[in-house]
Image (tube, rainbow, N blue to C red):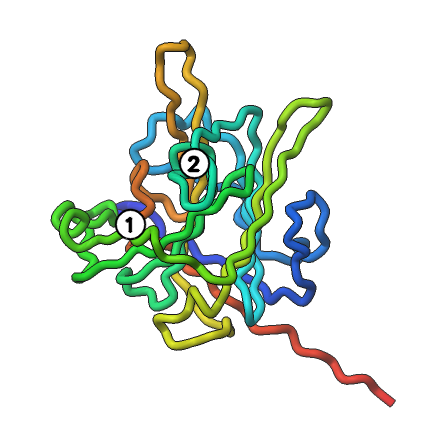
Amino acid sequence: MYAGETALPVLDVPYATVKPAMEAKAEDPAWRNAGVVPQLTLSRESTEGDRVQPTEVRLLWDEQFLYVRFDCRDDRLYLPEAGRDARLYRGDVVQVFVDPKGDGRQVAEALCNAANDVLDLQILLTDEPRSDENLLLRPEVRERDCWLCVDWTMEGLKTAAAKEEKDGRLVGWRVEMALPAKAVLRRVGLAAFRPMELRANLVRYDWQAPPAENQKWSLVSTNWAPVTQGNPHYSPAAMGFLKLRPKPAVLGTQE
């Protein structure tokens, strides 16, 4: 908990009685019953509050996958990097962080952009995740004990992306991810999701065009569980809680 602030966010995630089509289409009935994060919030210490564009996130689960859908309002895309495992965070991208054990020692991360480029990695800590008052890993931990393992592949990850236009102009983009249980839960010895609690964060990087040609693009970073600007990878203690709710009971038929 941040000093003077409310507790970390909690979201109930319903079971996917209808599986998402994973086509990133505007209308997919599977998402109607999802758990909803209506709006991601601005990163701590950011000065870009007047430039935040809305982002809605929906989540579902079944035994095989944790499903996440981002709907991002936007009128201009910035995609300077392309391809599998490129440095997508240098452009517009959404990110999912999941810590299945909840101790901050191993976090699975998946990033995807509007072109459906993917970067997946693991964040590993070789010592206790000591954090400061902002729930950011202390400098000595980040420099010595935190490892970003980009060579890791989240086997079975599924993604889809689509741009949304109105009258020929971009108004937003959408990404859907299906994070596989076998890859995400390996550290806790499970191969399938079940009603359980996961530490997680949901993040969007939205790069805004500079006012002049000789100036740099500026980052507007929004999160479900607020972290300091540009540091979602180094803030395991700030993650919220996803509560995977039980599968609805099936009523028997009567004679």
Three-letter amino acid code of the residue under disc 1: Ser
Question: Label 2 belongs to which residue?
Answer: 205
Q: 10 Å neighbourhood of mark 1: few (<14), some, or many (≥20)? A: many
Could you tell me which residue is drawn at 41 percent across and 10 percent down? 213
Q: In this view, does 202 lie above or below 124?
A: above
Residue found at the far right of this picture: 255
Q: In the figure, residue 51 lies in which quadrant?
A: top left
Whether residue 97 sits left or right of residue 21 in the image: it is left
Q: In this view, does 210 lie above or below 93?
A: above
Whether residue 92 sits left or right of residue 178 in the image: it is left
Three-letter amino acid code of the residue under disc 2: Tyr
Question: Label 1 belongs to which residue?
Answer: 235
Could you tell me which residue is drawn at 48 percent across and 30 percent down? 79
Q: Is mark 1 on a helix, strand or loop?
A: loop
Coordinates of residue 60 in the picture (x, y in percent): 58, 60
Pointer 2 with pointer 1, Cβ within 8 A: no
Could you tell me which residue is drawn at 25 percent across and 49 percent down? 135
* Quadrant in which the C terminus appears: bottom right
Q: In the figure, residue 210 lies in which quadrant?
A: top left
Could you tell me which residue is drawn at 44 percent across and 24 percent down? 208
Q: Is residue 165 above or below residue 240?
A: above
Q: 10 Å neighbourhood of mark 2: few (<14), some, or many (≥20)? A: many
Q: Is mark 2 on a helix, strand or loop?
A: strand
Q: Which of 210 and 44 is in front in this view?
A: 210
